[in-house]
Image (cartoon, rainbow, N blue to C red):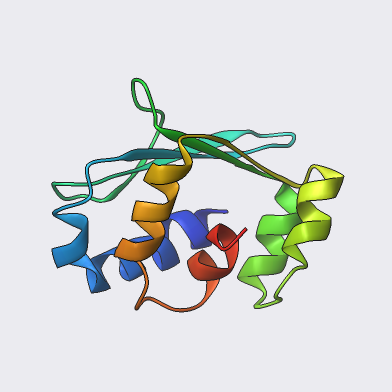
Amino acid sequence: ADVLFELFLPLMCEQRAKALEHFAGKIEFHLAGDAPHVWNVTGRERPWVQRGSVEDPDVQITLSQRLVEAIVRGEEPDLEAAMNSGEISVTGDPKVLAAFELSMQEATGLLGAMIKR
């Protein structure tokens, strides 16, 4: 999970820095499992990705440890199956999630696959 949230995601956010300066949302990523962790992506100011929760997140995305490991290995999981099995869940304001997806539109790879659903 550290590879995804502390290396890949921050690099993708830096690639889209101008767009994230205009993104006003707060998104929390929860890693479920034996050692749960939380990271957040907050627009406007750097650093874009930080460990820990934020007050009143607009969107919460919960991912299973197995799903994160698969993403880090470069697999492209079936997101519909992952949603149906509970390996990924998304709650919150869909408009904020859509705005984040637009902000990250040119960044390809893992994050794009995670938020397409």
Q: Based on the displayed image, in which of its 4 quarters is residue 57 positioned?
A: top left
Relative to 33, say whether 115 is above or below: below
- Outermost residue on the front side: it is 95
Q: Based on the displayed image, in which of its 4 quarters is residue 18 positioned?
A: bottom left
Query: Relative to 82, is 29 on the left or the right?
Result: left
Residue 51 placement (x, y as % from top left): 39, 39
Residue at figure coordinates x 73%, y 61% from the top left: 79
Report the quarter where the C terminus lies: bottom right
Residue at figure coordinates x 13%, y 47% from the top left: 45
Residue 104 placement (x, y as % from top left): 35, 66
Residue at figure coordinates x 66%, y 34% from the top left: 35
Relative to 36, say whether 19 is above or below: below
| Count of marks overlaid on the render | 0
Query: Relative to 8, is 86 on the left or the right?
Result: right
Query: Relative to 31, is 22 on the left or the right?
Result: left
Residue 20 placement (x, y as % from top left): 21, 57
Query: Relative to 62, is 115 on the left or the right?
Result: left
Relative to 59, say whether 75 is above or below: below
Residue 16 placement (x, y as % from top left): 24, 69
